[in-house]
Amino acid sequence: MNLHVLQGNTWAINFPSAVGVYVFSDNSCLLIDSGASAAFGRRTLKVLENLGFQTRALFNTHAHADHCGGNRYIQETTGCPIYASQIEAAFIENPLLIPYGLFSASPIKALKNKYLMPEASRVDFRLEEGELFIDDACFKIIPLPGHSLGHTGIITPDNILFAGDSLTSIHILKEFPFLYLADVEKHLDTLNILKGLSLEQVSLTHGGLQNNISEVIDYNYQILMNLLEYILEVIKLPREREEILSLVVERFNLPLNRNQYVLILASISAFLSYLCNTKQAKVYTENNCLLFKGLT
């Protein structure tokens, strides 16, 4: 775990889920996400303290636990304000909504864990697309929905985009060829937005700094197309959602536990919604089952 410069005053801490850092002239800093737990929050503050940096504020790309798990510890320790989009703020402040949504009801205790349900923290500022000024530093807020409904990226004054989970690095996708998505249509729009930004360097939470961003976008797009094409193939016959999940997990050799099951199932739901909404599939009930069948 170390803090290294990406460009100018823009730094990153190499956790499994990277934390971005922008350092102001007075050695205070803006954190971009907070890691997966209070332990990562504690380590983040220790790394900053060793370099004489103090936390001024924290920006969350979205509300998933590996991005805001350190929020509460950092906020309680430093008193820093937290910035997030309107939608993600609801989940950050009410994290029970995350396993509730994944389970479609009050979740079983096994799903109320730190991987799915981070500690609650207070969001002080709800952001929309546009410019965010902190002192004389100008950050650009870019909505990048798809992975989550209110997912947001931030471009630092050094022109480095912290893209959160809107993209995954190629080497990770080669090992784990799956995308966790809440809205496929919005994610496709986000890929087009990212392509149009013409940025040379983008920092990903899972994969670090990317200099070949156009190639990364294309690879993410191809993974999504592979998943949609396979689902269309398997729903040539009517199938239930859980059966589709089982086939996808087997086809792409995905690891599975209780957490992964509900996360993958939510993504399968997003894929099926997209296929139905674009008239590539239909959904109906038969023999007391909810079935999906392709129309092509």
Image: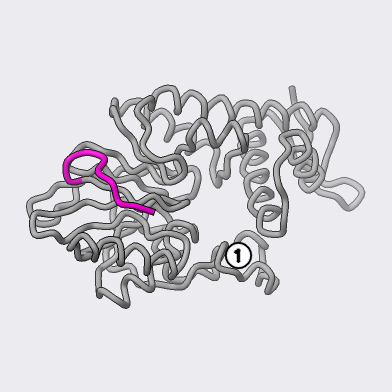
Percent coordinates x, y for residue 54 in the rendering: 20, 65
Relative to the observer, which residue lies in front, 147 or 114? 114
Percent coordinates x, y for residue 94 in the rendering: 47, 71
Q: Is residue 129 visible?
A: no
Compared with 262, 217 (above or below) is: above
Q: 182 left or right of 73?
A: right
Where residue 291 sits, quadrant-wise, is top right
What residue is rendered at 47% in x and 51% in y? 16
Percent coordinates x, y for residue 218 in the rendering: 48, 23
Q: 135 left or right of 275?
A: left
- The mark total stands at 1
Magenta residue span: 1-9
Q: 210 left or right of 51?
A: right
What residue is rendered at 43% in x and 31% in y? 191
What residue does disc 1 label? 99
In the rendered structure, does residue 282 fall within the stretch colored magenta? no
Indicate the amino acid at tag 1.
Pro
At mark 1, the secondary structure is helix
What residue is rendered at 69% in x and 70% in y? 110
Q: Is residue 18 visible?
A: yes
Percent coordinates x, y for residue 2 in the rendering: 34, 52
- For label 1, the crowd category at 10 Å Cα-Cα, with few meaning under 14, some 14 to 19 and many 20 or more, is many
